[in-house]
Amino acid sequence: MNILKSGWFSEVSDLWPGLALSLKVEEVLHSERSQFQEILVIKTKAHGRALILDGAIQCTEKDEFSYHEMISYLPLCSHPKPKDVLIVGGGDGGAAREIAKHPDVERITLVDIDDRVIEVCKEYLPRLSLGFSNPKVTVFVGDGFEFLRNHLGEFDVIITDSSPAEHLFKQPYYELLRASLKPNGIIASQAGTAWESMQQVQSTFQHCKTVFPVATYAVTAVPTYPTGQIGFVLGSLDSRTNFAEPMRIFSDEDLDQMEMKYYNDKVHRAAFILPRFVEKELQVAQSTN
Amino acid sequence: MNILKSGWFSEVSDLWPGLALSLKVEEVLHSERSQFQEILVIKTKAHGRALILDGAIQCTEKDEFSYHEMISYLPLCSHPKPKDVLIVGGGDGGAAREIAKHPDVERITLVDIDDRVIEVCKEYLPRLSLGFSNPKVTVFVGDGFEFLRNHLGEFDVIITDSSPAEHLFKQPYYELLRASLKPNGIIASQAGTAWESMQQVQSTFQHCKTVFPVATYAVTAVPTYPTGQIGFVLGSLDSRTNFAEPMRIFSDEDLDQMEMKYYNDKVHRAAFILPRFVEKELQVAQSTN
């Protein structure tokens, strides 16, 4: 199965062997090899524009909102007052766009290692990269590890919006996340899907659980990700945190004004309800109350 | 993109344009054209065996449990005493297998138009078709419409486990379903996904709503269906039915004994929590209480 053969882009990876999602391509808008990765932007037939890094679909305009709303508002609404937010990765700007809508958020810092992703998204994915033009947002180009080491104790919420195959998913990274949080801070990281990458989900969850007094796992639907869903690991330094019950509940009118298409407090709670086989594998005592 | 080319099966359909899921094939186990459809059974590299009808993946051994548990237990657990259950379609046996586990269910009738699907599944998909060997189950081969006309007022629950492209998804079918139910009976039908087939979801939901005093829509994750999820329309003749709150709650021990891998009462409730954009499109006043 060849990538970009016969007018389709096909996503083939050892992370989800024997399974491939393909999007029909109308036009290749941009293709380059940066210092870090292959960057590809295509115009698809039915899913708007798509950003693809090293052969893995990062987002399509059609369904990116569910990922970006959920990776942002699951942690934000679990924190009593998220003023300072750090995004590690997120070079497309989608998470920054969503986080900037939260009225308590005063400063958003985004650190992505690849400035070419940021520049390419500014040019070809303006609906996502509009996040960068919000005055709350400051962008740093560099290594997330390095950045965290130099900003200890500074953030209320840290969101890791990055591909699963990176060094950001080992335990030292979680220890660094903890050190860079303010008291009672909260983290969220992309954490793969239990249907195809249970081992990755389990190890990410264990790292988080080892480092944070409260740790849990949630999922959301993203049709153009492998298996049609993606998971998040969440950790809190505050032992009173119950991630499954949002502290901040936005009204329907608020959410309309914020142009939220996926998230509300009911969706928040439901994201923590896991199928039996996932609950057993994670041995998480999830609470719905 | 060619089906079965280069060792992959690719699912391409006008129902989800521009999107294709592919499964790596190790062996084609069976291929025939029956009176009604192309029947294909493949051994995949990573998803067990898969049944494919007219080019559409019906189920894989790896993830069929979520579909079959949910299409069965969302309606069964919404009924106070589901003794007589009818399955229209379901020729693979997976729904029958699940329904037979419910202790209140006394008789399961399955009517599928294509006896070749049933026979092929008995031979190649024994994990699903073991449903047929349960003494509660009686199989009829024939047209669902015709069968319903001859069995008015006989069933507590009717489950339509069939492909979306059929005549079973028009309003006359829903009127016939109503007529074939006992008082306070309940139906559930496969109803497509809001991400790719919103129009189909809306029209199926409207048919159901027009005919039944209580109607709603729920979703479950099925990684090898287009978009990674599938929806169900549910209808009840009992105006007191609240589908989002199960009447029958099985304990964890019960569910272990029943070998349930996906469903429990929390998963039941969460299935009715829809993303904001879906809730708006359906104009459903969902209740989580």
Image (spheres, coloured by chain):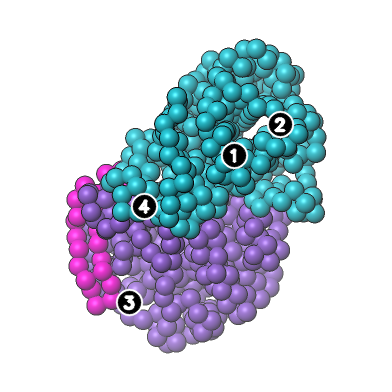
Chain colours: A purple, B cyan
Principal SS element in the magenta part?
strand
The percent position of residue A148, horizontal first and vertical second, equals 44, 82
Nearest the camera: A31 or B241?
A: A31
Query: Mark 1 against mark 2, which lies toward the viewer?
Result: 1
Q: Amino acid at mark 1?
A: Lys
Q: Which mark is residue A113?
A: 3
Q: Which residue is mark 4?
A: B8
Q: Is residue A35 above or below residue B22?
A: below
Q: Earlier in the sequence, mark 4 or mark 1?
A: 4
Q: Amino acid at mark 4?
A: Trp
Q: Are marks 4 and 2 in contact (CB under 8 Å)?
A: no
Q: Which residue is mark 1?
A: B122
* Residue sitting at x 38%, y 35%: B15
Q: CA distance from mark 3 to mark 2?
A: 60 Å
Tag 4, which secondary structure? Answer: strand
Q: Dot 1: few (<14), some (14–19), or many (≥20) neighbours within 10 Å? A: many
Query: Mark 3 against mark 1, which lies toward the viewer?
Result: 1
Q: Dot 3: few (<14), some (14–19), or many (≥20) neighbours within 10 Å? A: some
Query: Mark 3 against mark 2, which lies toward the viewer?
Result: 2
Q: Which residue is mark 2?
A: B137
Q: Earlier in the sequence, mark 4 or mark 2?
A: 4
Q: Which region shows up in magenta? A: A25-51
- Confirm whether circles 4 and 1 share one chain: yes
Q: Dot 2: few (<14), some (14–19), or many (≥20) neighbours within 10 Å? A: many
Nearest the camera: A156 or B131?
A: B131
